[in-house]
Image (cartoon, grey):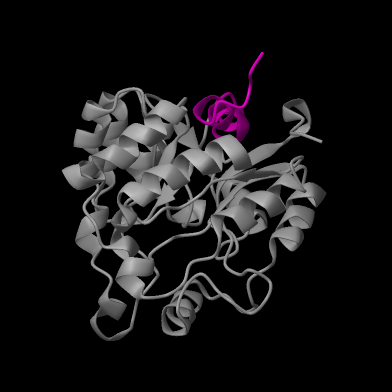
């Protein structure tokens, strides 16, 4: 079973596997509780099987990943292999991404290759603030080079984060690492690497728009915010210069696709642009159409 692109109404490029289904979560309890409070989440995170059923019912596909931040947080990650294996059982709706902590060094390069070649992983997720690294740090370049050679995208959190919000010292999470302008060097030095800047990038929305407009290999996803709160310049660019480079993303389970889609219907987006944002741009960015 595989994705039937013609039957999908939307492709959500940003969802989180928050639990392994056996009592272990992707974040330490304190940070997880803070994020839930920030987003108003009331129920525990779904399993990957539950996520698949949710998206299948809505005739949507979803990119699913965890965040590997073991070095910065001292918290064991959820296994990339487990996520990829679970996603493979639901390949009609789930697209597996992986996350590798840049601190893993050369071991991370080998893991990236193995995950793509042996497990069918279709991209990689980075969260600079949680993983505590600058995206333009040359020490991370070997990992980008490997991902670029593998021909899959890299998706980077940008802007403010709900993780650590309201905790003393923000739970140790530093926002500065998630300025999207730090991705400009990466886009220059790896022109064949597809880069997805995640979220409306508050307080750096203009920086994200500048990089995505200037660099042909850079996209923006719209996850983590209800569309009714999108900055006006983001809406303007999505309707015009970036109409083929903006992607639907929810941040599920923190924000549901149902809520996102309901608010998106009220957004001033041209009729011809809506299917690009909801589906077509993701097909291009993720390399889903092979014929």
Q: In which quarter of the image is residue 186?
A: top left
Work out whether 13 lies above or below 226.
above
Q: Where is residue 15 in the image (x, y as percent from the top left)?
A: 57, 54
x 47%, y 25%: residue: 244
Q: Quadrant of residue 143?
A: top left
Residue 267 sits inside the magenta stretch: no
Residue 194 seen in the current view: no
Tell me the quarter of the image containing the N terminus.
top right
Q: Where is residue 108 in the image (x, y as percent from the top left)?
A: 38, 49
x 35%, y 23%: residue: 192
Q: Which of 67 and 208 is in front in this view?
A: 67
Q: In this view, does 227 lie to the left or right of 90?
A: left
Q: Which of 44 and 59 is in front in this view?
A: 44
Q: Position of residue 247 (x, y in %)?
A: 50, 37
Q: Where is residue 202 in the image (x, y as percent from the top left)?
A: 30, 55
Provide the residue span drawn in magenta. Answer: 271-291
Work out whether 50 lies above or below 61.
below
Tell me the quarter of the image containing the C terminus.
top right
Residue 264 seen in the current view: yes
Instruction: Count how many numbered circles sit on residues in the image.
Output: 0
Q: In this view, does 133 lie to the left or right of 68?
A: left
x 63%, y 68%: residue: 20
Work out whether 42 lies above or below 225.
below
x 28%, y 28%: residue: 190
Residue 274 sits inside the magenta stretch: yes
């Amino acid at each position: 079973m595989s994705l039937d692109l013609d039957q999908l109404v939307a492709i959500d490029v940003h969802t989180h596997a928050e639990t392994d289904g056996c009592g272990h979560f992707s974040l330490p309890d304190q940070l997880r509780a803070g994020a839930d409070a920030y987003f108003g989440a009331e129920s525990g995170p779904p399993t990957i099987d539950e996520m698949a059923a949710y998206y299948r019912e809505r005739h949507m596909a979803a990119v699913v990943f965890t965040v590997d931040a073991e070095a910065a947080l001292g918290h064991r990650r959820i296994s990339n292999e487990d996520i990829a294996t679970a996603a493979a059982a639901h390949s009609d709706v789930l697209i597996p991404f992986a996350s590798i902590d840049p601190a893993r060094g050369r071991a991370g390069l080998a893991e990236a290759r193995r995950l793509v070649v042996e497990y069918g992983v279709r991209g990689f997720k980075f969260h600079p603030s949680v993983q505590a690294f600058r995206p333009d740090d040359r020490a991370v370049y070997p990992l980008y080079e490997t991902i670029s050679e593998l021909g899959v995208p890299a998706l980077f959190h940008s802007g403010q984060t709900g993780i650590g919000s309201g905790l003393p010292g923000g739970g140790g999470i530093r926002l500065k690492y998630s300025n999207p302008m730090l991705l400009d060097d990466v886009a220059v030095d790896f022109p064949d690497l597809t880069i997805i800047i995640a979220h409306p990038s508050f307080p750096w929305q203009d920086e994200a728009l500048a990089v995505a407009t200037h660099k042909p290999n850079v996209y923006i996803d719209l996850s983590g915010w209800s569309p009714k709160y999108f900055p006006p310049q983001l809406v303007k660019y999505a309707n015009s210069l970036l109409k083929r480079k903006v992607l639907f993303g929810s941040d599920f389970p923190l924000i549901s696709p149902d809520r996102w889609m309901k608010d998106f219907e009220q957004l001033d987006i041209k009729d011809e642009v809506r299917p690009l944002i909801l589906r077509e741009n993701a097909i291009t960015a993720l390399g889903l159409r092979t014929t």
